[in-house]
Image: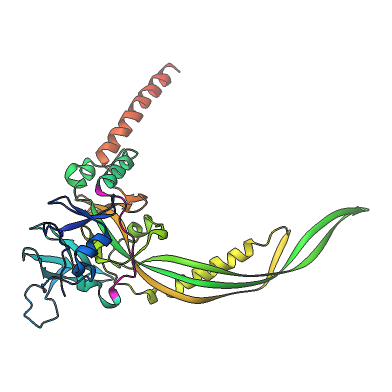
């Protein structure tokens, strides 16, 4: 399995994708290149050919990367780490078995583990980052202003520096839903009183509805180890900005490959789509006092699953007192945030003391005079 580092055509430095300009930037000579310019200047990069490299410790001709058993789990199973050689400096890079892009901690070049995204694991689409690190940091600090009881460690400069841009894997489901509805509607025509009895005149109507609905990009998380609240809490993404997958978009960010196949939740998604289509047909029936459904059906056609990588800024914090992991996540396209925050019990105690002790004193004084 090969590793890749995108090189600057001018100086040979490592290139990183810049969300603000939507171009590849070199941190050494400060050159920038669009996707088209990079492909023209470096045909090998356009073809996404890996630099000569192989998993660390592998002899020529060997395909399998050595694995180091590492504590951790996903779905109740142990995960393993994989070791690679950095194509720029030769240093060893240790990653999780689902990680597809990382950094070399010695030469600081972004490294794409190309083999992780080949064949059936190659994404169909990627949604590039539009929120850069500085903007994500400002969003985080603005969000924290509303949270009064968060420990200072959670937003210390050292902690904020650990904010990481990650491409998470998602499955996208699209189809055409053809629905049919037969029902009976009752409409009140007025009322009259005869003697002591009130009569209501009603008419019954036969109702038929048919329609076709194009469903696009129903999204599901495709990574077991990712916190479900984290990867789903930042949704939705704006799918109009999806681009055909290119390795270059991963440069400068971390990326994960999927370890959940679409078949694992296909029945659930198809049921959800059928329910949505049926509800849409039912909602088109208006103007009746009551409606009784006689028959209803939804047929799904041209269903397809596509694999995409979506951008998320993440920040995690481990509370040593409870040994619990807390997190902040920011949608790397829209800036939407979600998170589960730790509570500083000391700050909370001070708050209650400032509120309730003066109130208690006032009540004691009032009670004394009464």
| Position of 29 relative to 264 (above/below) | above
Secondary structure mostly taken by the magenta-highlighted segment of the chain: loop
Is residue 21 or residue 103 the one in the foreground?
A: 21
Q: Quadrant of residue 138?
A: top left
In front of the other: 31 or 231 = 31
Is 2 placed left or right of 207 in the picture? left
Colour mapping: rainbow
Residue sitting nearer the eye, 230 or 355: 230
> Is 125 a magenta residue?
yes
Q: Residue at x 15, y 73 (%)?
A: 2
Residue 64 at x, y percent in the picture: 14, 79
Residue 287: give x, y in percent of width and height.
Answer: 72, 57
Q: Measuring 26% from the left and 55% from the top, which residue is drawn there?
A: 23
Query: In the image, 354: left or right of 370?
Result: left
The picture places residue 177, in percent across and down from the top left corner, at: 54, 72
Point out the stretch of residues depicted in magenta. 121-133
């Amino acid at each position: 399995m090969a590793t890749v580092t995108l090189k600057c055509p001018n100086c040979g430095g490592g290139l990183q994708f810049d969300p603000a300009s939507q171009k590849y930037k070199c941190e050494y000579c400060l050159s920038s290149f669009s996707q088209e310019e990079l492909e023209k200047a470096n045909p090998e990069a356009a073809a996404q050919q890996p630099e000569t490299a192989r998993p660390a410790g592998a002899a020529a001709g060997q395909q399998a990367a050595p694995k180091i058993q590492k504590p951790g789990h996903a779905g109740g199973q142990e995960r393993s780490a994989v070791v690679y050689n950095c194509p720029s400096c030769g240093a060893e890079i240790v990653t999780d078995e689902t990680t597809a892009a990382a950094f070399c901690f010695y030469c600081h070049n972004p490294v794409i583990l190309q083999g992780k995204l080949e064949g059936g694991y190659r994404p169909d689409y990627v949604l590039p980052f539009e929120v850069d690190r500085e903007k994500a940091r400002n969003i985080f600090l603005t969000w924290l202003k509303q949270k009064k009881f968060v420990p200072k460690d959670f937003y210390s400069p050292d902690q904020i520096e650990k904010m990481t841009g990650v491409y998470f894997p998602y499955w996208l489901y699209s189809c055409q839903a053809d629905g049919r509805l037969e029902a009976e509607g009752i409409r009140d025509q007025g009322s009259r009183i005869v003697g002591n009895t009130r009569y209501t005149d009603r008419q019954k109507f036969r109702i038929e509805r048919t329609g076709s609905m194009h469903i696009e990009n129903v999204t599901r998380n495709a990574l077991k180890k990712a916190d479900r609240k984290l990867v789903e809490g930042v949704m939705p993404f704006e799918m109009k900005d999806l681009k055909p997958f290119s390795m270059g978009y991963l440069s400068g960010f971390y990326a994960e490959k999927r370890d959940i196949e679409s078949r694992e939740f296909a029945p659930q998604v198809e049921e959800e789509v059928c329910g949505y289509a049926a509800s849409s047909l039912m909602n088109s029936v208006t103007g009746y006092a009551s409606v009784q459904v006689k028959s209803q059906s939804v047929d799904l056609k041209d269903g397809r699953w596509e694999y995409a990588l979506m951008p998320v800024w993440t920040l995690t914090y481990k509370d040593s007192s409870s040994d619990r992991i807390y997190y902040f996540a920011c949608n790397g396209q829209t800036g939407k945030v979600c998170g589960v925050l730790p509570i500083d019990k000391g700050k909370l105690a001070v708050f209650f003391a400032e509120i309730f002790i003066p109130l208690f004193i006032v009540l004691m004084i009032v009670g004394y005079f009464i």
